[in-house]
Amino acid sequence: MVQIKIFDTTLRDGEQSPGVNLNQLEKLEIAKQLERFGVDIMEAGFPASSQGDFEAVKKIADTIKDVSVTGLARAKKSDIDISWEALKGAAEPRLHLFIATSPIHMEYKLKKTPEEVIDIAVEMVSYARQKFPQVEWSAEDASRTDLPFLAKIIEKVIDAGATVVNLPDTVGYTTPKEYGEMFRYIRENVPNIDKVSLSAHCHDDLGMAVANSLAAIENGATQVEGTINGIGERAGNAALEEFAVALNIRNDFYPYHTNLVLKETKRTSDLVSKFTGMVVPANKAVVGRNAFAHESGIHQDGVLKNASTYEIITPELVGIHSNNLVLGKHSGRHAFKDKIKQLGYELSEEKLSEAFKAFKLLTDRKKEVTDDDLFAILTDVQTDV
Ligand code: KIV
Ligand code: ZN
């Protein structure tokens, strides 16, 4: 089984979610939880972006010792110098250096020719390597970059000392087949490619970030970048918990594994949601409130007989204590009986039928029947003479 390194960017790309602003203490708490979750690399922020981010990255780099800590820098000497000051205390100081390589970004944003972009990338990677033992170089907007140009610049930054090459789908535009083919092309057309690890970094604008990340590892990427709960710029980044659980559950299909401690998934998700204020949608895969909830009678009956009938992931795998049979209008007698037993009631068949009838009447008026509603029904049925 090939190990896929997990590069978490919740504290950098995740914090770029509109409306999210984490303070130093919140960042540090999340960083400690990411360490428990077992990520291999955490991007703690963008040190040159503000004094607050510089201090938060420094604090995390000085505190977290079991995970490699990195920070983002533009291809500028001043960004690299500031990042070094923030990251030099890390167990393994690592810089994440980027420059855009797509025609649209080079022409309109950078206002540079492709040759100028190559020269800047090479100069900045070798400058960064004078300080940092590990330098990840990212070709921003790689998925919209001309492939022969991408191969050319990658070959040069590897010669300049890059240790990881990341190929982001910055605008979430690519498809699994196309993204996989880009990795294959780079592996086949860059002569010195074996000197570096290849990394995938996907955004979710078309809802394909996790699928694209899976396609990347099938084509040679050995590192995947993403965030907890998939938060991030615009529609967000690849959700790391979804990626890791997919590898775990479909290990018959994917011969890869990560070092993530999956039973820490829920706790990590809850903490990130609490500090960022970004509520996890109820139907979100793996960590949403409904991910292990069953409402229809047919499903509830199946789950009570054998959970695998409708659950491909056990709640315990991701640190949730049990599944949840939600009582609503589709629920059947079996689930109803089971639920009232959990509440401590054993009814005769006759009383059970009476209570079930009252429950069904209530479901026409209420979408979800709560424990309090059930207590009221049970009290009525039992005091009924
Ligand atoms: O999406 C992106 O291109 C990025 C880079 C800065 C790596 O986040
Ligand atoms: Zn990004």
Image (cartoon, helix red, strand yellow):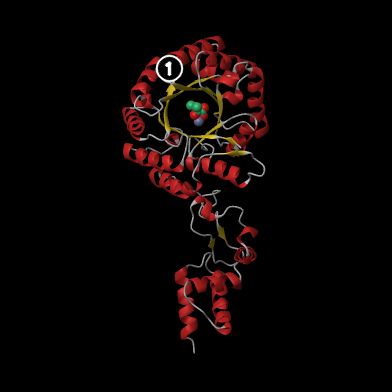
> Residue at coordinates 61% horizontally, 47% vertically from top-left?
249
**Residue 168 shows in the view:** no
Q: Where residue 275 sits: x, y (%)?
A: 38, 44
Q: Where residue 45 sits: x, y (%)?
A: 40, 31
Looking at the image, how many numbered discs can be counted on the residues?
A: 1
- Asked if 267 appears above or below 360 in the picture, the reply is above
- Asked if 203 appears above or below 136 in the picture, the reply is below
Which residue is nearer to you in this view: 105 or 138? 138
Q: Where residue 341 sits: x, y (%)?
A: 51, 74
**Residue 283 shows in the view:** yes
- Asked if 16 appears above or below 346 in the picture, the reply is above
Q: Is mark 1 within 8 Å of ligand 1?
A: no
Q: Quadrant of residue 77?
A: top left
Which residue is nearer to you in this view: 279 or 184? 184
> Residue at coordinates 48% horizontally, 73% vertically from top-left?
374
The outermost residue toward the front is 1
Q: Where residue 254 sits: x, y (%)?
A: 64, 40
Q: Is residue 7 left or right of residue 274?
A: right
- Asked if 358 appears above or below 71 in the picture, the reply is below
Q: Quadrant of residue 294?
A: bottom right
Check disc 1 and report the residue beneath it.
128
Which residue is nearer to you in this view: 29 or 35? 35
| Residue type pointed to by label 1 | Ala
- The quadrant of the picture occupied by the N terminus is top right
> Residue at coordinates 61% horizontally, 33% vertically from top-left?
217
Disc 1 is placed on an element classified as: helix
> Residue at coordinates 60% horizontally, 19% vertically from top-left?
193
